[in-house]
Amino acid sequence: MTGPSCPCGPPGREPGPDTVPDDGSWLPGSGADRHPIPQARIPAGTYTRGDSSGDRNPGDGEVPRHEVSLDSFWIDETSVTNAAFAAFIADTGHRTEAETFGFSAVFHLAVTAPRVDVMGPAAGTPWWWGVRGADWRHPGGRDSTIDDLADHPVVHVSWNDAVAYCAWAGRRLPTEAEWEYAARGGLASATYPWGDDAVDAGGWRANIWQGTFPRHNTGEDGWLTTAPVRTFEPNGYGLWQMVGNVWEWCADWFSPTAYTDAPARSPQGPATGAARVLRGGSYLCHASYCNRYRNAARSQNTPDSSMGNAGFRTVAG
């Protein structure tokens, strides 16, 4: 396994093949009626992409700030839920890469499995444990279930799994330019989807870590791991939990210098790479060490990696 740049991020696997279907089946169209997540229309417009807060993380490539123009598109109001993903699995028989590999990455306080299933900590991020039998149906390991988590975001899905869902649903993953534009909710240069106020100002606004990482989470926001997708308040575009809760896969290959040569209109990211972009942070982020629950924050992982704090949302148009 390889590790990402973000200490609250998950360990990754070695790069796998790019499995985007080459027949165009991932484009919006045939299967859109299968996708149950409500949609929000994001208007065409221009915004300034990149970090304006000075909180950027070295190596993440959040600068230079630059203007980006986008056409209108539709985006899921929430992350794809366990219920939605279950319908995809039932219809297609798809086996996720966590199931194929036989293990996935679980935060150590969330492990619900016999000790024999724990493969050990990931190098450099000992709070991440490889757990045999951990997958989207068993987020903590074989002794866990999603029976009461239908409205929580699906996790332990790789980028390749997310693209497979999109192909079935007649949708696609957002570019990271689309993702950031949507996350901002119409607030230019704001640090967070709700503006510049701190995440706990006047009550919690996102599902992140509280307490002393990685040993003690005080649970002030009500959650140790994932929260239901419609928790807290939506942004100005009606989108829920664009930051915190779970990282979300984007279509782009990751490069720390992607912004340097990015076109001004509808950037798609680099043509090749070893890792795909993740956006939004997760329930493990905290300002003291991983302040990536910001609109401009970026991270990465290999396209076949899966973990207990990453999911996705889809777009069309």
Image (tube, rainbow, N blue to C red):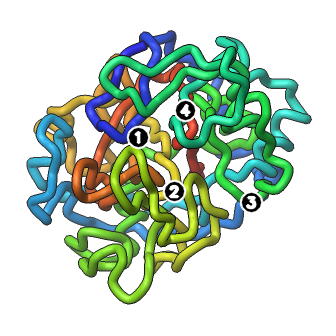
The residue lying at 80 percent from left, 42 percent from top is 145
Q: Contact (CB < 8 A) between labels 1 and 4? A: no
Checking the image for residue 278, the label placed there is 1
Q: Dot 2 lies on which element?
A: loop
Q: Is residue 21 visible?
A: no
For the residues labelled 4 and 3, the Cα–Cα distance comes to 18 Å
Residue 305, placed above or below residue 244: above
Separation of disc 2 and disc 3 at Cα? 13 Å
Q: Which residue is mark 2?
A: 245
Q: Label 1: how many residues lie within 10 Å, few (<14), some (14-19) or many (20+)?
A: many
Which percent across, then down, holds residue 179? 41, 54
Out of 118 and 70, give the one closest to the viewer: 118
Q: Is residue 45 left or right of residue 217?
A: left
Of 222 and 211, nearer the camera is: 211
Amino acid type, mark 3: Asp
- Res 119 quadrant in image: top right
Q: CA distance from mark 3 to mark 1?
A: 21 Å
**Pointer 3 with pointer 1, Cβ within 8 A:** no
Tell me whether the residue at label 2 lies in contact with that at label 1, contact meaning CB atoms closer than 8 angstroms: no
Q: Which residue is painted at 17% across and 40% down in the image?
A: 61
If you read the primary sequence from the N terminus, does the residue marked by circle 1 or circle 4 appear first?
Answer: 1
Mark 4, residue position: 307
Which residue lies at the image location 76% right of the left edge and 54% below the top edge?
149
Q: Assign the N terminus to one quadrant of the image.
A: top left
Q: Is residue 264 above or below residue 27?
A: below
What kind of element bears circle 1?
strand
